[in-house]
Image (cartoon, rainbow, N blue to C red):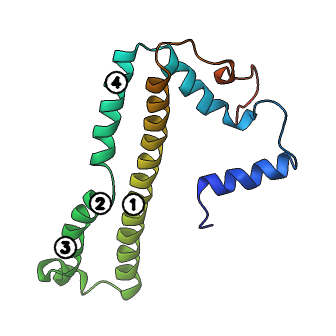
């Protein structure tokens, strides 16, 4: 449960292919499609996209989430909010707190997923920029009709 996507992917890959497959791994076709698209762009467009991705990377993370959750906790523990909550049954109060906690955890999860996908795009853009305007290698070509999950 606490393993990352890459570790889960590795174990799924080992389960599907106990020995490394001789050709492309179809599970990576979605990454190949992104890389192939970036390879077709001009260097200037790649640089602009990389700058945009770096901007987004700096705006995502735990700090914005933590700053947005402080007012939530302030509302939970403030006297004005607690007065109407006091007559409510205890299970309902705990349910409201659990809902607020679940929303906070969901927000954290969404922020981390966004950060992970942004990192993927940054790495692929940096590789495309380093490659220059050479044609994309054959390994970027997705396997037709496969890799849909």
Q: Which tag, 3 or 4, sits closer to the chain's start?
A: 4
Q: Which tag, 4 or 2, sits closer to the chain's start?
A: 4
Residue at 83%, 52% (x, y): give it: 15
Badge 4 density bin: few <14, some 14–19, many ≥20, Cα 10 Å: some
Residue at 41%, 84% (x, y): give it: 91
Which mark is nearer the camera, 4 or 1?
4
The answer for how far apart the CA atoms under marks 3 and 1 are is 19 Å
Q: Please name the residue that numbered disc 2 is placed on.
A: 65
Instruction: Answer with the quarter of the image where residue 64 lies.
Output: bottom left
Q: Which tag, 4 or 1, sits closer to the chain's start?
A: 4
Left or right? Give the position of 63 relative to 121.
Answer: left
Q: Please name the residue that numbered disc 4 is placed on.
A: 47
Which mark is nearer the camera, 3 or 1?
1
* Quadrant (top left/top right/bottom left/bottom right) for the N terminus: bottom right
Instruction: Answer with the quarter of the image where residue 52 lies.
Output: top left
Element type at marker 1? helix
* Quadrant (top left/top right/bottom left/bottom right) for the C terminus: top right
Residue 139 image offset from top left, x and y in percent: 68, 24
Element type at marker 3? helix
The answer for how far apart the CA atoms under marks 3 and 4 are is 44 Å
Which of 23/71 is in front?
23
Residue 63 image offset from top left, x and y in percent: 27, 61
Residue at 46%, 35% (x, y): give it: 121
Q: Please name the residue that numbered disc 3 is placed on.
A: 75
Q: Which mark is residue 108?
A: 1
Element type at marker 2? helix
Which of 23/116 is in front?
23
Q: Which tag, 2 or 3, sits closer to the chain's start?
A: 2
Residue 44 image offset from top left, x and y in percent: 34, 16
Vertical side of 147 occupied by 59: above or below: below
Element type at marker 4? helix
């Amino acid at each position: 449960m606490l393993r990352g996507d890459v570790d889960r992917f590795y174990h799924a890959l080992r389960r599907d292919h106990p020995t490394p497959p001789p050709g492309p791994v179809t599970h990576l076709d979605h990454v190949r499609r992104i890389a192939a698209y970036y390879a077709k762009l001009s260097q200037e467009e790649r640089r602009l996209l990389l700058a945009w991705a770096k901007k987004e990377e700096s705006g995502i993370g735990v700090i914005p989430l933590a700053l947005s959750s402080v007012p939530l906790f302030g509302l939970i523990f403030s006297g004005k909010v607690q007065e109407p909550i006091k007559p409510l049954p205890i299970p309902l109060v705990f349910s409201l707190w659990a809902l607020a906690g679940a929303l906070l955890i969901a927000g954290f999860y969404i922020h981390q997923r966004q950060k992970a996908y942004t990192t993927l795009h940054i790495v692929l853009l940096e590789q495309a920029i380093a490659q220059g305007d050479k044609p994309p290698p054959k390994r970027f070509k997705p396997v037709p009709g496969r890799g849909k999950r």
